[in-house]
Structures are given as C-alpha cells and as structure tokens.
Image (cartoon, helix red, strand yellow):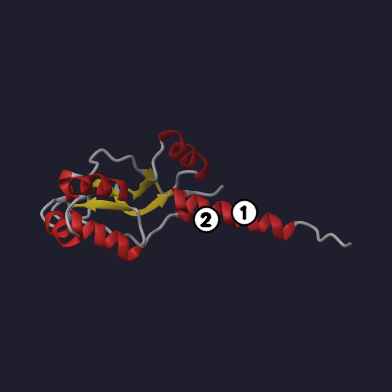
C-alpha cells in the first residue's frame, strides 16, 4: 500500500507570518510552486498561503504599476492573508484516502506531519504525476500488435 511518504515533496519552501506578500509571490515564482506553509521561527506550522491567496490580496492593487504593487505588497504581512486553520496529513496515511480527501474538500495540498513536525507537503500535482506514471506503465505493458 502506497503512503503519503512515497510521493510527498520534502524540499520545502516556507515563510513566517511576518514575511511579506511580495516575498511569497517571489518565492512561488522562483520555485514554480503554488502553496507555502507558514511556520514560526521554531518551525511550527501555523498557516498556509496559496497562489490564490496572493491573487486575491493583489486585487486591491491591480490598477497600480508593478513597482507600486510591489511596494504595497511588501507592507502586507502574510499573517493577514494566510489560512490559519490548515488540514494536515500524517506521512503514513494511505494515498487513496488522501486523494479522496483532496477531491472531496477541493483543496490543492496538505502539509505533511511526522510527530507534529512539518516534514513535507502533498499536492494535487503529486497525484497527477502518479497518474501519468501509471498510464505510462500501462501503455508499456500493452502487447505490441503486429499488422
């Protein structure tokens, strides 16, 4: 049985509640990610910021120039836009159940915990990668048809 630990991302990019919206935007763009766990200086998970959160917060600065928008976003702490009540998953959870949870609750990710500490993140993109891999394996195992 496959578990979250088998496919989760362990190379985490995190920020703190005091970091700015601009820092989150830049970090997400630099690493091509859509979800940022927000942690304290002791690495305790206290929230989550998504690409959607950043877009929603930026709506108020949509008419500003990119420079002006960056200046405003630099003043907005992530604590004001982050989701504080975050669903999490244990690294030993079965993948099927986690996939069903993501689908049912329409969430794009779950931070992964081990003994209460953040050790990874599992996203809908991770499940797409699994599906692609399975399709490739199925295609490779199909018998070759001779004409």
Relative side of 122 to 96, left or right? left
Residue drawn where x is 31% and y is 65% of the image: 30
Residue 134 placement (x, y as % from top left): 62, 54
The disc at residue 129 is 2
Task: Name the residue located 56 percent from the left edge and 47 percent from the top edge.
Answer: 1
> Residue 22 shows which numbered tag?
none
Q: Secondary structure at mark 2?
A: helix
Residue furthest to the top: 104
Q: Position of residue 8 (x, y in %)?
A: 43, 54
User: Can see residue 117?
Assistant: yes
Q: Quadrant of residue 33?
A: bottom left
Q: Residue furthest right?
A: 147
Q: Is residue 48 visible?
A: no
The quadrant where residue 68 appears: bottom left
Q: SS for tag 1?
A: helix
Q: Badge 2, how many Cα within 10 Å: few under 14, some, many 20+? A: few
Rendering coords of residue 27 (x, y %): 27, 62
45 relative position to 101: left or right? left
Mark 1 residue crowding within 10 angstroms, few (<14) / some (14–19) / many (20+): few
Identify which residue, 93 or 110, lies in the foreground: 110
Q: Nearer the viewer, residue 62 or 144?
A: 62
19 left or right of 126 in image: left
Q: Residue 17: horizontal and vertical position, in percent? A: 16, 51
Look at 12% across and 59% down and name the residue there.
Answer: 71
The residue at 37%/52% (across/down) is 121
Residue with the mark numbered 1: 134
Q: How many marks?
A: 2
Question: In the rendered view, would you say 96 is above or below 77?
Answer: above
Marks 2 and 1, how far apart in space?
9 Å
| In front of the other: 59 or 42 | 59
Contact, mark 2 vs mark 1 (Cβ under 8 Å): no
């Amino acid at each position: 049985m496959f578990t979250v630990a088998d496919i989760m991302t362990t190379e985490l990019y995190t920020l703190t509640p005091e970091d700015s919206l601009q820092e989150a935007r830049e970090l997400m763009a630099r690493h091509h990610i859509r979800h940022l766990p927000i942690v304290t200086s002791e690495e305790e998970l206290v929230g989550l910021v998504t690409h959607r959160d950043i877009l929603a917060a930026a709506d108020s600065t949509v008419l500003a120039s990119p420079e002006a928008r960056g200046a405003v976003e630099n003043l907005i702490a992530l604590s004001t836009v982050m989701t504080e009540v975050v669903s999490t998953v244990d690294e030993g959870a079965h993948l099927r159940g986690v996939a069903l949870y993501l689908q049912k609750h329409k969430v794009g990710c779950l931070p992964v915990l081990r003994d209460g500490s953040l050790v990874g993140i599992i996203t809908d993109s991770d499940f797409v990668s699994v599906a692609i891999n399975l399709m490739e394996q199925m295609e490779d195992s199909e018998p070759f048809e001779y004409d």
